Image (spheres, grey):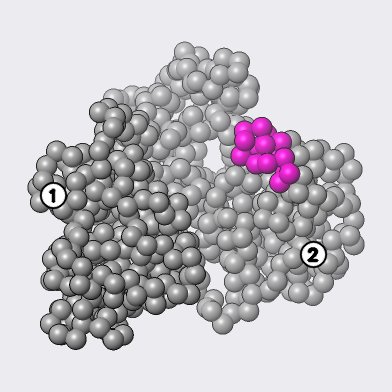
Amino acid sequence: MSALLEIHGSIAVIRIDNPPVNGLGLSTRTSINEFLQESLSRDDIAAIVLTGTAKAFSGGADIKEFGTDKTFASPNLPSVLDAIENARKPVIAAINGVCMGGGLELALACHYRITMSGCPIALPEVKLGLLPGAGGTQRLPRLLDMATCIDMVSNGSIYLSENLRQSALFDSFIDDQSSLLSSAIEFAIAKSAARPIPKTSERPVVQVGDPNLFEAARAVFHKKSPFLPAPIKCIDVLEMSTLHSFEDGLKKEREAFQFLLNGAESKALRHIFVAERAVGKIDGVNAETTVRTIKQVAVIGAGTMGAGIAMNFASAGIPVQILDAQAASLERGLLRIRQNYGATVAKGRLSQEQCERNCALISGAQDYEQIRDADLVIEAVFEQMEVKEEVFRSLDRVMKPSAILASNTSTLDLDQIAQFTSRPTDVIGLHFFSPANVMELLEIVRGKLTSPEVLATCANLSKKIKKTAVVAGVCDGFIGNRMLAQYTKQAAFLLEEGCTPQQVDRAIENFGFAMGPFRVSDLAGNDISWAIRKARRISKPDEIYSDLGDLLCEQGRFGQKTQAGWYDYTAGDRTAHPSALVANMIGDYSQKNGFKQRSISDQEIVERLIFALANEGRKILEDKIAARSSDIDVVYLKGYGFPRHRGGPMFYAELVGWDYVDAAIDTFSRGHRGETWA
Ligand code: 3HC
């Protein structure tokens, strides 16, 4: 049973009981329906209160059941809502917590709603590429003004119940939270004999003042989310409520819901919903795993990365020391932090007071002895094993026994680093992405000997600093950069065959990325990948790269910062203009090397690049560097701008079919630089 029935005198209380969020899966719907019918058939019951257990009324339809035969199995959600609205006894929703999606639709079908403050109220289906499919788009406009409805349905905005207190959504608002249920029972007794029983569907739609409201909203979403059909469909069906009867509006809503449910965008967004929650489940870590307390953090190195890392902790209210032996670089690092916070204040995203509080939590240190009491120390020094060795030997010597010793390395072998200490179980990789105070992704690198306790502590801490942490094993580039290397390589090979940077970028941007590989490289600085290639040419001399990136840098074309990269730029303007010089450089280089030129379709460009990611992702899984395929998708979404509505490279490959991907790879492997697909 996923609901409970309690009898309080003449009032039946049905409690939805399906932890963690009282999702309305088949078993919950069945239980609600059975208890409803029982309550309606009993002469001693005069009214019914519907509420939820724990902290939720209901989080809506069970997302994990979508796509299975349970989604529409009887009793489906609309039929349960229908039974409630047409019940011959009053049904009162006592909203005791999260009330979202199908959960809110359930409450809307009840005859009265009673609530308290602090309950999140939302129709967030749009975030799953859907729209409310159980009458939400037709009932809500009968209780709330259309502008609020559009915000709730098309943006999926979450409102706190107290902010809707004055609206017709609620018939009663209880200030004493502990008495919600007893108040709901009293309310039910008072309404037991009241007839007619009010139905939301029979109310008129709240007058829409502005005749251009729908058109204006559509224009906003065309611009804001051009790849997503759901927000516009949400507006369309909301408009239906003003043009058609409730029944006809409902029919249109169902059709649109079905259409979206079967679409690739919703499948991708639902995949990501589950993936983002799965990522926190770490092999060997469970609720019993001890989590160490982190009250003080230290960062080694006051460069851009070290300063950015330190800001994360200060922003979360955790004191942080930055250690740098060079007084001048320490001063520069501290100044950089102050300037960064200052810029956020100037943009209105941080108060001056908070800025001061954050800055006060950051202090400098020049000696290891000064940081010995830190609970976590993160090294962000130069990417060279000898430099790391010196740091880790020093840390091992001074840090207190329970301290976690972390490296921000993006390329070096963490297991080797751990061996520089006498406590390799306390060593972990915390790979932040630049700018470290902004980027949401954090790769937690698990060494061979890293203890579950250290992993659990860092995973827990990542939430406090608002990062999405994905656990990766030790390998060159971990998950994200290992895949990126294949993507950028193929992008350059496409130039060798006759594409222009703008053609490659446009194809990838049309796929949904905010920026293609060449615009990204110009933004990040072409000299950064140049330095990496130079190092790799020594460490991995057999690896195949295009020389084009090097030729570009040899001309000082480092990107936006030099106003010249793959594109031309003008001072103070980030607009990328195609460069005749670069076109000539590519042409000369290809001719000199005898590369056959051909016309390449946008589809091939996208497949070459996205399948390069998926192919490497598959190897990463085989090598057990990532725990699950969906973790790889989360890395790409959070760290590399992969379009959310495409679900990530692994999901995309699954959607088009691995057979298709493998056939394409087979073709690519017989083409230009085909050996790189091995
Ligand atoms: N269905 C199935 N599982 C759900 C769920 C849902 N609607 N909502 C949450 N869960 C699960 C999560 O997957 C997670 O499971 P896990 O522990 O196994 O990983 C667990 O509940 C806890 O979720 P969170 O970690 O997100 O917990 P929070 O407390 O941070 O947030 C929440 C709770 C605000 C309810 C958040 O989970 C949420 O936003 N859920 C989605 C709500 C939603 O989109 N509802 C609409 C569904 S579609 C619908 O109703 C269609 C209808 O119109 C026909």
Q: Dot 2, how many residues are within 10 Å of its Cα: few (below 14), some (14-19), or many (20+)? A: many
Name the residue type under label 2: Ala
Report the residue at 15% width, 85% height from top.
42
Q: Nearer the viewer, residue 184 or 473?
A: 184
- Whether 535 is drawn above or below 44: the answer is above
- Residue 199: % across, % down: 18, 59
The dot on residue 306 is none
Q: Where on the picture, by quarter, is residue 21? A: bottom left
Report the residue at 50% width, 38% height from top.
545
Q: Secondary structure at mark 2?
A: loop
Can residue 668 be seen here?
A: no
- Residue 11: % across, % down: 27, 80
Mark 1 vs 2, N-terminal side? 1
Q: Secondary structure at mark 1?
A: helix
Front: mark 1 or 2: 1
**Image-based side of 435 in relation to 342, left or right:** left
Span of residues in magenta: 340-355
- Residue 647: % across, % down: 35, 51
The dot on residue 374 is 2
Q: Which residue is mark 1?
A: 246
- Residue 622: % across, % down: 42, 64
Q: Where on the picture, by quarter, is residue 7? A: bottom left
Which quadrant does the N terminus fall into? bottom left
Name the residue type under label 1: Phe
